[in-house]
Image (spheres, helix red, strand yellow):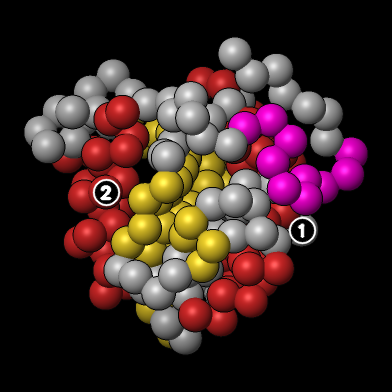
């Protein structure tokens, strides 16, 4: 896996309330594989991590969302934590950022509660995926084929259920990110994309 992501720029999108290990472990795996990783958040400074219900460490924000251009990144990673994706769903700029990766067919990895934001970005319809169990109904209602597995890979989309799946998740994420765009993945106006967003031109 060494340096298979050299030269690739990867965005990790998160905010306060992320599950700490679900950000730090994928970030470590990506950097060890040679990727240039940036933590992007709706605010500058730092964001607060959690270890389940308890506060953990803060993580520095590399670039505030308002200054981040999604076209500058080859892949996107979405950590979980209940508070983090729930807050991001209310940030239209965050949803628009995620939607770029969906419509451009760039690889995306999301763990635990992370796939919540993919629903708002129109990125789950027709996709086979997994998540924290409480998201099953939400994802099925949005058109996903939800399964209970440690890691699910579907044409550049990597999903896992919980911190215990991180080893499998990180390995699959690095592999899919190294492959780049998946032209056979759903793109364009996938699923129930939110109103107010303009369609992206997909090459």
Residue on which disc 1 sits:
90
Question: Percent x, y for residue 168?
Answer: 22, 60
Most extreme residue toward the right, as rendered?
196
Residue 50 shows which numbered tag? none
Name the mark nearer the viewer: 1 or 2. Answer: 2
Quadrant position of the N terminus in the picture: top left
The answer, for residue 180, to whether it is visible in the render is yes
C-alpha span from label 1 to label 2:
29 Å
In the visual, does 72 lie left or right of 198?
A: left
Q: Residue shown at 33%/35% (left/top)?
A: 177
Question: Judging from the image, what secondary structure is the residue with disc 2 in?
Answer: helix
Q: Residue shown at 74%/36% (left/top)?
A: 189
* 155 inside magenta stretch: no
Magenta span of residues: 187-196
Secondary structure mainly formed by the magenta segment: loop
Task: Note whether 148 is above or below 54 in the view shown.
Answer: above
Question: Percent x, y for residue 66?
Answer: 68, 34
Question: Percent x, y for residue 178?
Answer: 28, 30
Q: Residue shown at 72%/23% (left/top)?
A: 200
Quadrant position of the C terminus in the picture: top right
In the visual, does 135 lie left or right of 150?
A: right
* 192 inside magenta stretch: yes
Most extreme residue toward the top, as rendered?
203
Res. 196 image quadrant: top right
Q: Nearer the viewer, residue 169 or 31?
A: 169
Residue on which disc 2 sits:
172
């Amino acid at each position: 896996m060494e340096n298979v992501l050299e030269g690739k720029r990867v965005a990790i999108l998160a905010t306060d309330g992320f599950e700490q290990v679900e950000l730090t472990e994928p970030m470590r795996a990506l950097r060890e594989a040679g990727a240039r990783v940036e933590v992007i958040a709706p605010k500058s400074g730092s964001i607060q991590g959690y270890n389940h219900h308890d506060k953990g460490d803060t993580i520095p924000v590399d670039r505030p969302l308002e200054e981040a251009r999604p076209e500058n990144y080859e892949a996107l990673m979405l950590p979980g934590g209940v508070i983090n994706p729930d807050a991001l769903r209310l940030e239209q700029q965050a949803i628009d950022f995620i939607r770029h990766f969906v419509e451009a067919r760039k690889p995306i990895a999301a763990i635990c509660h992370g796939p919540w934001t993919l629903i708002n970005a129109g990125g789950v319809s027709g996709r086979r995926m997994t998540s924290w169990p409480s998201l099953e109904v939400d994802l099925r209602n949005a058109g996903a084929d939800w399964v209970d597995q440690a890691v699910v890979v579907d044409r550049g989309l990597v999903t896992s259920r919980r911190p215990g799946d991180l080893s499998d998740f990180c390995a699959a994420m690095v592999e899919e990110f190294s492959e780049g765009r998946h032209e056979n993945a759903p793109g364009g106006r996938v699923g129930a994309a939110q109103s107010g967003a303009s369609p992206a031109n997909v090459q």
